[in-house]
Image: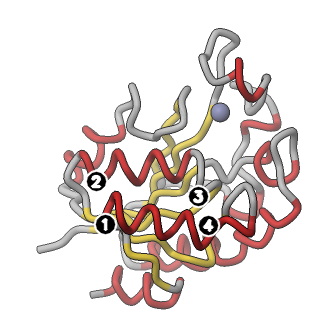
Amino acid sequence: MTKHAVIVVDVLNEFVDGLVGRPHAINVIEPCQKIIAAARDLKVPVIYTNDAHNDNDIELAIWGPHAMKGTEGAMVHDGVAPQDGDIVIEKHNYSGFFKTELDETLKGLGVDSLVVVGLYSNICCRLTCVDAFQHGYKVTIAREAMTSFDEAAYEGDLEYLKIVAGAEAVSVDEAIALLSA
Ligand code: ZN
């Protein structure tokens, strides 16, 4: 039987309205709230993968300091804050799987299917979805609950993830139906 989890990628202050925020990022908050609430009701694990950078993290050479561990920027946006029972995984690279406990955590829960939401479809969501595929997970994207750094590139990003990671992009309502099945 399929067991799902919802992966919430980098819905952090820094990526919504901070140093690497984009004006359209706020649009994912409400759809994220909807799917996260549904997952909690259905007892589907909700797992946050959050940048929590240290000074020597490789990424900073490209993006500059952002979402530094312990700062306001590295906090999950208020609208989708983790609650008791959710799982929070800190990461230092784009992918939620890279040098983290995400794969063991999912395997421990018996999860084999991920619904991925968050920021951004061309960076951390992309690398996380590809790694999820490479680790053997079925990947589904809840379309309104994700966006690209460049909003106009979003459809192309989804197409890439379909081709490379077999990721199916569905509406939030369809994703909730999937979690309920
Ligand atoms: Zn980062």
Query: Horizontally, is 97 left or right of 116 in the view?
Result: left
The residue that mark 4 highlights is 146
Sequence-wise, the earlier of marks 3 and 1 is: 3
Amino acid at circle 2: Phe
- Marks 4 and 3 close (CB-CB < 8 Å): yes
Amino acid at circle 3: Ser
Q: Residues within 10 Å of mark 1 (few under 14, many from 20)?
A: some
Task: Locate residue 23: give its quadrant.
Answer: bottom right
Task: Locate residue 101: give its quadrant.
Answer: top left
Q: Quadrant of the N terminus?
A: bottom left
In the displayed orientation, state which residue is furthest to the left: 1
- Marks 1 and 2 close (CB-CB < 8 Å): yes
Above or below: residue 22 compared with residue 30:
above
Cα–Cα gap, marks 1 and 2: 8 Å
Q: Residues within 10 Å of mark 2 (few under 14, many from 20)?
A: some
Image coords of residue 111 (percent x, y): 23, 58
Determine which of the numbered discs, if any, sits on residue 121 in the image: 3
Q: Residues within 10 Å of mark 3 (few under 14, many from 20)?
A: many
Determine which of the numbered discs, if any, sits on residue 133 in the image: 2
Above or below: residue 79 compared with residue 22:
below
- Marks 4 and 2 close (CB-CB < 8 Å): no
Determine which of the numbered discs, if any, sits on residue 166 in the image: 1
Judged from the image, the secondary structure of the residue bearing numbered disc 1 is: loop
